[in-house]
Structures are given as structure tokens and as C-alpha cells.
Image (cartoon, rainbow, N blue to C red):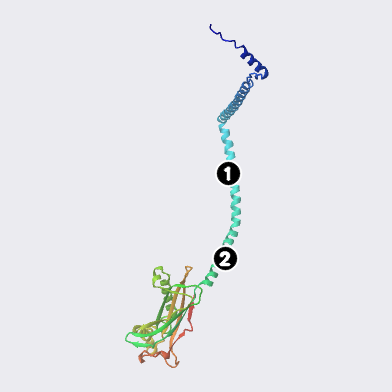
């Protein structure tokens, strides 16, 4: 006997009872989203419509303006010319007014510039004067005045002192020894020529390796042998007097006044520069070499003269010079 399946009515009854206790929520559908999207699309189409209409209106206006300008070309050109002329006149008026203001201010600007330049120059000079080197010189004799076949020569001692606040660089010195007759040759010109040559040596950068540097204070003395040629002695005693009085014999019946003595002059020049500026300085001395006994003179024909009977004295007319 085959068993037949039992009915599932009990199970279905249980499900129905569960639905009664916990009813299921009804299925709902969102019907509001579709109309909202449709409204947004319609709004976008309206915005596009307004933009297109505006662009079309602008385009028509521009076309109308261009057509009007083409039709009224001469009139527009005339108006433009008048406007350009007016603007040009305004610009010219403004430029002229500006030029007048600048012209009126030019003296004031020039005065201000000159005042600034003077102030800067004054400050520079004050700095230079307060910091620059000052080199003084002293020359003394340390040997006799000797006369021989070559002329006359003597040994002098040069003592330098830098009384400034900075070193003196590119230092050079030279000494000239000669015997003038009645200012021939002129000691002043000889001094100027000597200082010109000495400062020229100091000014050349290529001569730096030959130069001296003098720091503030006393410098070691230097003994220098100076000489005068036999020809210079003969010129002072014969040639220069004859040249100055060429007609003495014819006019006065006397020989030219040839002196039996010489009056030697010693000129020294010291050139140097500061270490902080491109400026040239020099110090010079013009000294007369005389015998200490005023009753005696220097006669080359009487031989040597000891140093104790000699002295260097500052020339009363030219003396010393410094810048």
C-alpha cells in the first residue's frame, strides 16, 4: 500500500498566521523623480534659448553697425579725424605743460645736484686729509765735497718720515745737484721737472715692484752719493756768463763776469700715493750747499772741502713744497 503525501495545509496556515502578526510593508514606487528630471531639462533648454537669442541680437546689431559705417564712410572718417585732432591737441597741451614744469624745476635740480656733489667732495676731502699719508724729508751731508776729473760729488743722507695715518705706497725719490749762475738754470724749473719725472714714476702701476712703501713713523735713513759733472761746473763758471753778457768786451771793454766760485743747489723730490685712493702726492726741497764760514766760498780749483765746513740750507725763495 503506497502512502500518499500529506497535505501542507498546516504549513500554509502557519505562514498566514505569521503575516497577520507581522504584516509586510507595501511595495512603493518613486514617481516624483521623473517629473523633477523633466523640469530640469526644460529649464536648461530655456537658458540655451535665451543665450542664443542674445547672441543673435548682438550679431544683428554688429551687422547693422558695420552696414551703417559702410554707408556713412566719409562721415565716420571725418568724425574720427576730428576726434584724433582733439586728442592730439590735448596731448600737445599736456606735454607743453609738463615741459614747462620740468623747465622750471631744472634750476632747482641743478642746484640740488651741485649741492650733493659739493657735499660728497667735501666728505671725500675730509676723509682724505684725515687718513692720507704725509711724507716729509730731511737731507744732510755725511761726507766731504770732493772735486776730481769727473766733477764734484758728495754723500747726502735722506731721512723720511710719514706723519699720516696710512701707508705711503709706490714711493720714489730723486735728487738733482747742479750749480746755477744768476738763476740760470732756474732752480724752480729744475724742481718742477724733477717732481714731474718722479711723480710719473710713482703713477705707473708697472713700477710698483721698484717702489718703496713708507708706513707711518720714521723711515730708515738712506745715504745717497750725488754728483755734478765737470761740464756743469764749466757751464756755471764760463759758458752761462758768456751767454748772458755776449757784448761785454765790445761795449764796456771788459771780459764777461766769470765767477771764480760756484753756488751748488741740491733739489730732492719724493713722490708717493695713498693706499685707498687714486691720488698723487709729492714733497720737494730746494737746498743751497754753502760753507759754514760765510767768508768762504766753494772754489773748485782749491780742492776738497770737509763735511764739517759744509751745510745744506733751505733756499729762501723756493724752500720746500708739499701737496
The residue sitting at the right extreme is: 21
- Mark identifier at residue 191: none
Rendered view: 209 above or below 84: below
- Of residues 96 and 229, the one nearer the viewer is 229
Residue 179 in view = no
Q: Is residue 47 left or right of residue 224?
A: right
Spot the residue most to the bottom.
295
Q: CA distance from mark 1 to mark 2?
A: 45 Å
* Coordinates of residue 269 in the picture (x, y in percent): 44, 77
Q: Quadrant of residue 57?
A: top right
**What residue is shown at x 42% (from left), y 78% (from top)?**
190
Decide which of tag 1 and tag 2 comes sooner along the chain. 1
Horizontal relation, residue 297 to residue 23: left or right: left
Q: Residue at x 39, y 71 (%)?
A: 209
Give coordinates of residue 235: x percent, y percent. Answer: 36, 84
Residue visible at 56% across and 35% down? Answer: 77
Depth order, front residue of 49/234: 49
The numbered disc on residue 88 is: 1
Query: Is 3 left or right of 199, judged from the image as shown?
Result: right
The residue lying furthest to the left in this view is 149
Q: Residues within 10 Å of mark 2 (few under 14, many from 20)?
A: few
Question: Is 24 rendered above or below residue 300?
Answer: above
Identified at 59% across, 42% down, the residue is: 87
Q: Is residue 244 above or below residue 293?
A: above
User: x, y percentage for residue 204?
Assistant: 41, 69
The residue tagged 2 is: 119
Q: Where residue 91 sits in the image (x, y, percent)?
A: 59, 46
Front residue of 152/255: it is: 152
Amino acid at each position: 500500500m503506497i502512502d500518499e503525501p500529506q497535505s501542507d495545509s498546516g504549513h500554509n496556515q502557519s505562514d498566514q498566521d505569521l503575516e497577520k502578526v507581522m504584516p509586510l510593508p507595501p511595495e512603493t514606487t518613486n514617481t516624483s523623480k521623473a517629473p523633477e528630471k523633466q523640469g530640469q531639462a526644460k529649464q536648461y533648454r530655456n537658458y540655451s534659448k535665451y543665450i542664443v537669442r542674445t547672441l543673435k541680437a548682438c550679431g544683428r546689431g554688429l551687422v547693422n553697425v558695420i552696414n551703417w559705417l559702410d554707408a556713412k564712410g566719409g562721415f565716420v572718417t571725418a568724425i574720427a579725424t576730428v576726434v584724433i585732432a582733439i586728442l592730439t591737441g590735448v596731448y600737445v597741451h599736456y606735454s607743453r605743460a609738463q615741459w614747462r614744469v620740468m623747465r622750471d624745476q631744472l634750476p632747482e635740480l641743478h642746484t640740488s645736484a651741485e649741492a650733493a656733489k659739493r657735499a660728497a667732495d667735501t666728505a671725500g676731502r675730509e676723509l682724505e686729509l684725515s687718513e692720507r699719508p704725509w711724507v716729509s724729508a730731511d737731507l744732510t751731508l755725511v761726507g766731504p765735497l770732493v772735486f776730481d776729473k769727473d766733477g764734484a760729488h758728495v754723500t747726502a743722507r735722506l731721512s723720511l718720515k710719514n706723519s699720516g695715518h696710512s701707508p705711503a705706497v709706490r714711493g720714489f725719490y730723486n735728487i738733482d745737484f747742479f750749480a746755477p749762475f744768476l738763476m740760470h738754470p732756474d732752480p724752480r724749473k729744475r724742481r718742477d721737472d724733477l717732481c714731474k719725472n718722479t711723480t710719473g714714476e710713482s703713477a705707473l702701476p708697472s713700477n710698483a715692484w721698484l717702489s718703496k712703501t713708507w708706513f707711518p713713523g720714521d723711515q730708515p735713513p738712506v745715504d745717497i752719493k750725488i754728483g755734478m759733472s765737470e761740464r756743469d761746473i764749466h757751464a756755471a763758471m764760463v759758458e752761462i756768463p758768456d751767454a748772458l753778457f755776449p757784448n761785454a768786451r765790445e761795449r764796456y771793454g771788459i771780459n764777461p763776469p766769470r765767477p771764480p766760485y760756484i753756488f751748488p743747489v741740491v733739489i730732492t723730490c719724493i713722490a708717493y700715493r695713498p693706499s685707498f685712493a687714486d691720488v698723487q702726492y709729492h714733497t720737494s726741497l730746494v737746498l743751497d750747499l754753502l760753507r759754514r764760514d760765510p767768508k768762504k766760498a766753494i772754489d773748485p780749483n782749491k780742492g776738497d772741502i770737509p763735511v764739517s765746513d759744509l751745510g745744506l740750507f733751505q733756499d729762501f725763495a723756493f724752500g720746500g713744497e708739499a701737496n
